[in-house]
């Protein structure tokens, strides 16, 4: 199967990837790599202190609980209809960390001004090796490449946000 591309407008194959992720089906390794490269380009232009427009729905730790994330969107409204601020801790502990963080990153690429994803303490190399994300990547992909791609991307996540702007 040929990986879908993330085009320069953030649409095209990206919308199909988001639909795939909403079905809790992980992306291929090459798709994750392309998605994270595009996200890195967006995040490099953002400040470590990210302004967030009100009204905004603020979401705490997800920890790989993919179905809870989908329920948050069902209750709070789909992106881009709702502004979202995610406070970090997307991975570890749950069974669907790969799908959870992939969906959030895909939505960030698709709607960069409507979703803010902050870096939590679980978006680090050391913590993810202890609490499950590393092992999940090995199980789902057969190697640590996707783990490395995501942990490299985590270095670009903003650290805090200012609301009410």
Image: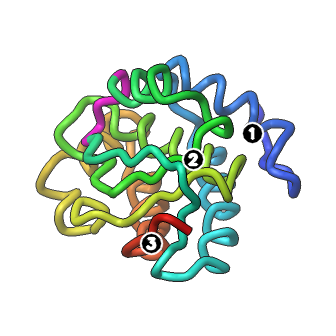
Q: Position of residue 41 (x, y in %)?
A: 69, 72
Q: Position of residue 96 (x, y in %)?
A: 33, 31
Give the mark nearest the N terminus, 3 or 1. Answer: 1
Disc on res. 14 = 1
Q: Residue at x 40, y 21 (%)?
A: 71
Give the mark nearest the N terminus, 2 or 1. Answer: 1
Q: Is residue 137 left or right of residue 54?
A: left
State the separation of the CA atoms marked 2 and 1: 19 Å
Asked if 24 appears above or below 10 in the picture, the reply is: above
Disc 3 residue crowd, few under 14, some 14–19, many 20+, Cα 10 Å: few
Give the mark nearest the N terminus, 2 or 3. Answer: 2
Query: Does the magenta segment cover residue 29?
Result: no
State the separation of the CA atoms marked 2 and 3: 13 Å
Asked if 41 appears above or below 130 in the picture, the reply is: below
Look at the image and give the residue range highlighted in magenta.
63-67
Q: Residue at x 51, y 45 (%)?
A: 104
Q: Are marks 2 and 1 in contact (CB under 8 Å)?
A: no
- Could you say which quadrant of the image residue 77 lies in? top right
- Could you say which quadrant of the image residue 69 lies in? top left
Mark 2 residue element: loop
Disc on res. 4 = none
Asked if 92 appears above or below 45 in the picture, the reply is: above
* Residue identifier under label 3: 162
* Residue identifier under label 2: 83
Q: Residue at x 49, y 67 (%)?
A: 153
Query: Would you say the magenta stretch is mainly helix, strand or loop?
Result: loop
State the separation of the CA atoms marked 3 and 1: 28 Å
């Amino acid at each position: 199967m040929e990986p879908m591309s993330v085009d320069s407008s953030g649409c095209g194959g990206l919308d199909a990837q988001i639909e795939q992720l909403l079905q809790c089906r992980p992306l291929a390794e090459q798709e994750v790599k392309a998605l994270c490269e595009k996200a890195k380009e967006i995040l490099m232009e953002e400040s470590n202190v990210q302004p967030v427009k009100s009204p905004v729905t603020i979401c705490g730790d997800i920890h790989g609980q993919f179905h809870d994330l989908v329920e948050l969107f069902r209750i709070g409204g789909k992106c881009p209809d709702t502004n979202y601020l995610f406070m970090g801790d997307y991975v570890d502990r749950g069974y669907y960390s790969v799908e959870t963080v992939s969906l959030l990153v895909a939505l960030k690429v698709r709607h960069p001004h409507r979703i803010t994803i902050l870096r939590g303490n679980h978006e680090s190399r050391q913590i993810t090796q202890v609490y499950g994300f590393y092992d999940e990547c090995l199980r789902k992909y057969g190697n640590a490449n996707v783990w490395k791609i995501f942990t490299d991307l985590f270095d670009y996540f903003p650290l805090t946000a200012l609301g009410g702007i």
